[in-house]
Amino acid sequence: MKMSDVLSADTKYQLKKVLSSSTKEDEHLTRRDWEEIMGIRKDTYKRIGGRIRRKQ
């Protein structure tokens, strides 16, 4: 059984409206944005004299 069989016509219309408005086709992510999403650009820390400090 498919979802389209269960949903009413009105519900299908509302779902299609929500999905089409939530996707932004004109938004292009830069390489830096992708690196932040993947977690590459996290702060790194190290212990110096018992304290934890950000690595530079």
Image (cartoon, helix red, strand yellow):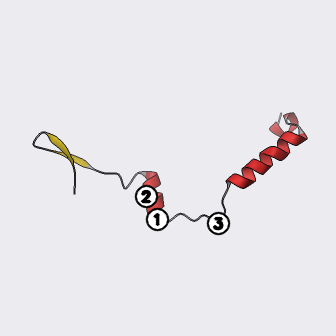
Residue 35 tag number: 2
Left or right of residue 13, residue 24 in this image: left
- The residue under the point 85% across, 36% down is 7
Q: Residue at x 9, y 43 (%)?
A: 49
CA separation in Å, label 3 and label 2: 20 Å
In which image quadrant can residue 9 be found?
A: top right
Name the amino acid type tagged 1: Arg
Answer above or below: position of 25 versus 50: below
Q: Residue at x 78, y 50 (%)?
A: 17
| Residue holding disc 1 | 31
Place of residue 16 in the rendered image (x, y in percent of width and height, measured from the top left): 79, 49
Question: Residue 2's x, y, as percent?
Answer: 82, 37
Examine the rendered structure and indicate whether residue 49 appears above or below residue 33: above
Q: Is residue 21 above or below residue 7?
A: below
Q: Do the CB atoms of the residues marked 3 and 2 lie less than 8 Å apart?
A: no
Given the image, on which type of amino acid does mark 3 rest? Asp
Task: Tell me which corner region of the image, top left, top right, bottom left or bottom right, holds residue 27.
Answer: bottom right
Q: Which mark is residue 26?
A: 3
Mark 2 and mark 1 in contact? Answer it, CB < 8 Å: yes
Q: Mark 1 falls on what kind of element?
A: helix
Name the residue: 78% across, 44% down: 15
Dot 2 crowding, Cα within 10 Å, few <14, some 14–19, many 20+: few
Real-space CA distance between mark 3 and mark 1, rounded to the nearest whole angstrom: 16 Å
